[in-house]
């Protein structure tokens, strides 16, 4: 049975649809940074996702090659995530998507080292015929956050964010969004196959006492 991070770590990936405070451990990701409207057909964001999944599945399927990753176990590729920001603004203005700066990312298991990532970046172009040089291996120390499951369209997220802000304040925390600690989303639904009102997205904001 493949290890599924969503099921094994429900407190991080399957929160309730009411806010909660959570302490997020350090995790490793593959990531692509860019800017612009994520809905733009053929745009930079859509290209970034193709690169990310190309590397994610090259690492996962390494078990079928001669390359061996120490400590490897079979797993389900974790969900797509993203950090989002807009210059000069705390939080997100959903009416100005063209101004968005983002880091699209997918978690990798702890057994994946930088050398294994480098192997995947070298291997992937042979199958995909794409330039994977934009993909990075990053470590994220997110720490203390408020999070909530958002049900519905991405454009309706401000209502959930307002609930999170109010809850954090009631618990004695301040929202701590900075260039280093950003608005974070985890996508549990495929928007190509899911009606907008049924989309599930984890929203996470950094906080401090």
Image (tube, rainbow, N blue to C red):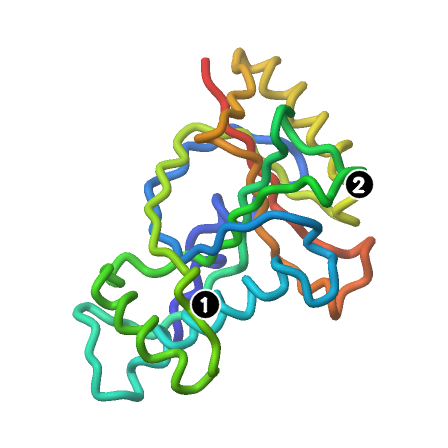
Query: For mark 1, does the 10 Å Cα neighbourhood hold few (<14), some (14 to 19), or many (20 or more) residues?
Result: many
Whole-angstrom CA distance, mark 2 to mark 1, is 27 Å
Which residue lies at the image location 47% right of the left edge and 83% below the top edge? Answer: 129
Answer above or below: position of 189 versus 174: below
Q: Which mark is residue 156?
A: 2
Q: Is residue 2 left or right of residue 194?
A: left
Answer above or below: position of 92 versus 43: above
Secondary structure under tag 2 reads: helix
Secondary structure under tag 1 reads: loop
Which residue lies at the image location 69% right of the left edge and 40% below the top edge? Answer: 99
Spot occupied by residue 73 in the image (x, y as percentages of width and height): 28, 72
**Which image quarter holds the N terminus?**
bottom left
Spot occupied by residue 120 in the image (x, y as percentages of width and height): 32, 73
Considering every residue shown, the one lying at the far left of the view is 70
Q: Is residue 175 left or right of residue 115?
A: right
Q: Is residue 56 visible?
A: no
Dot 1 corresponds to which residue? 77
Q: Nearer the viewer, residue 55 or 41?
A: 41
């Amino acid at each position: 049975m493949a290890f599924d991070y969503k099921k094994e770590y429900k407190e991080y990936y399957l929160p309730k649809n009411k806010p909660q405070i959570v302490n997020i451990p350090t995790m490793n990701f593959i990531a692509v940074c860019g800017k612009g409207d994520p809905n733009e057909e053929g745009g930079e964001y859509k290209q970034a996702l193709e690169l990310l999944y190309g590397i994610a599945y090259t690492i996962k399927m390494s078990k079928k090659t001669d390359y061996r990753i120490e400590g490897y176990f079979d797993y389900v590729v974790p969900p797509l995530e993203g950090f989002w920001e807009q210059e000069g603004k705390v939080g997100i203005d959903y009416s100005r998507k063209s101004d968005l700066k983002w880091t699209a990312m997918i978690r990798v298991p702890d057994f994946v080292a930088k050398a294994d990532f480098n192997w995947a970046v070298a291997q992937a172009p042979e199958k995909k015929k794409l330039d994977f040089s934009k993909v990075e291996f990053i470590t994220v120390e997110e720490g203390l956050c408020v999070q909530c499951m958002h049900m519905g369209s991405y454009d309706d997220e401000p209502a959930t964010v307002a609930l999170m802000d109010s809850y954090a304040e009631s618990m004695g925390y301040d929202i701590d969004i900075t260039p280093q600690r950003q608005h974070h989303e985890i996508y549990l639904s495929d928007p190509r196959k899911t009606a907008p009102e049924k989309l599930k997205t984890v929203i996470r904001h950094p906080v401090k006492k």
